[in-house]
Amino acid sequence: MPDTPANTSEPTSDHPPADRSESDETFVVTPYAVSGEVDYGRLLERFGADPLTDAQVARFPDHPLVRRRTFYAGRDVDRYLEAAESGEPHAIVTGRGPSGPMHLGHVPPLYLAKRFQEATGATVYLPLSDDEKFLAKDQSFASIGEHTRENLRDILAVGFDPEKTRIVIDTADADVVYPIAVRLANHLTPATVEAVYGETDTVGLQFYPAVQATHLLLPQLVDGRQPTLVPIAVDQDPHVRVCRDVASKEALPVAKPGALLGRFLPGLEGPGKMSTSGDTPSIELTDGPETVAETIRRHAYTGGQATLEEHREKGGDPTVDVPFQYLRYFFEPDDDRLAELAADYRSGTVLSGELKALAIDRITDFLTDHQRRRDALGELASELEPYRLTAGERRRALEAAGVPARVE
Ligand code: TRP
């Protein structure tokens, strides 16, 4: 069902109550800050997104990340599913903020997008927000540029179909991104930005939501109105919300993008978000087998007991055990095997060290494949070329957005 281009009245929940008092917030989730213990259910109420229904889960191309509800909520999921099922055009946008090396926590949306592309032919857009990370992370442009190039290799290694995939880099594709962002920024007030993101340090970051809104509309501006889904960790939902809001205020030929929202992969130190900023190391996509083994053995939080005897007697808790959680999120595809492991861990038959060993095995297998594809890449610019927007696509996007063409 198409959106009307302008002033669609929004029946669902894009506008959650704004008057919730600060004092009852025990956790914070914005694109720029995640802290406290995240209550994923409460968060949906706060953001105004919907939990996935069993029927929706069953309709997605089968993948452990959806089946096990790591991706657990969304917006406008049905429209996307209808298009995917009926073979009509449909798109996915998921991106990367190139502020450092990519680690395991960055993998789920990318590999999920790849799976959806293979299963139903989704067009996939992958924006890299080097502008955002320059503004947010206190790094030089040179340093962000270096991370951008390294991250691009990881993204290319996923193996997206170049015919159906576009990679966009904000500062390198500014000819397209900037004019559209300006048009959208016309509806972005400082009050909205502050309500959605909290206080920002600079006016640059105040403008950035217009850039990410542009990313989310690009597939439709290039190829025409179509259901678009944004699979991403839940901290990025505010960007989707803002995009839906500003898009409906301009007569653009686009439907509001939907979202597929994921929980955070826990950090090695235990429940929470895997991050590069804390003290505990994370597992980077370029780590070799020994580093992976060493990092997990030394740093992974376990749900086991202090001594072997106690463990045999009382058993462990897989729900907080990080190696088990990694297996559950992504790395053990077999549901029966996983259930068996959980039961045996609870009963004390399986030890923490055994779960660690299995996680090390699976993660190493995954990374070995990823790194084989990464290492096989040639020079970056030529590898990237087939994924860049063509001249025609750039023109189409600018025309569809009604922004003045460049002087040529
Ligand atoms: N802002 C995202 C981050 O910090 C990266 C990103 C840019 C993105 N554009 C996007 C994510 C579009 C999803 C969709 O990680």
Image (tube, grey):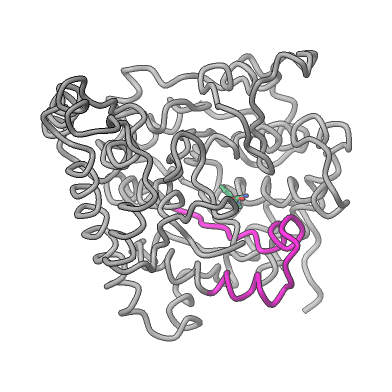
Q: Position of residue 320 (x, y in %)?
A: 36, 30
Let me know if residue 407 is in the magenta part. Answer: no
Measuring from the top left, give residue 57's x and y in whole percent: 32, 25
> Residue at 87% of width from left, 36% of height from top?
189
Q: Is residue 167 above or below residue 261?
A: below
Q: Quadrant of residue 190?
A: top right
Question: On the rendered image, what quadrant is the C terminus found in?
Answer: bottom right
Q: Residue at x 88, y 32 (%)?
A: 191
Q: Please state which of residues 115 and 206 is positioned toward the viewer in this rendering.
A: 206
At x 55%, y 71%, the residue is 390
Q: Nearer the viewer, residue 319 or 180?
A: 319
Q: Which residues are magenta?
A: 124-149
- Residue 236 is left or right of residue 78, and the answer is right
141 magenta-colored? yes
Q: Hey, which residue is sitting farthest bottom in the picture? A: 379
Seen in the picture, residue 210 relative to 365 is either above or below; the reply is above
Quadrant for residue 301, please give it: top left
Q: Is residue 56 above or below residue 230?
A: above
Percent x, y of residue 112: 36, 46
Q: Is residue 56 left or right of residue 132?
A: left
Characterize the magenta stretch by its predominant secondary structure.
helix
Q: How many marks?
A: 0
Q: Position of residue 286 (x, y in %)?
A: 38, 68
Left or right: 164, with 221 as reference point: left
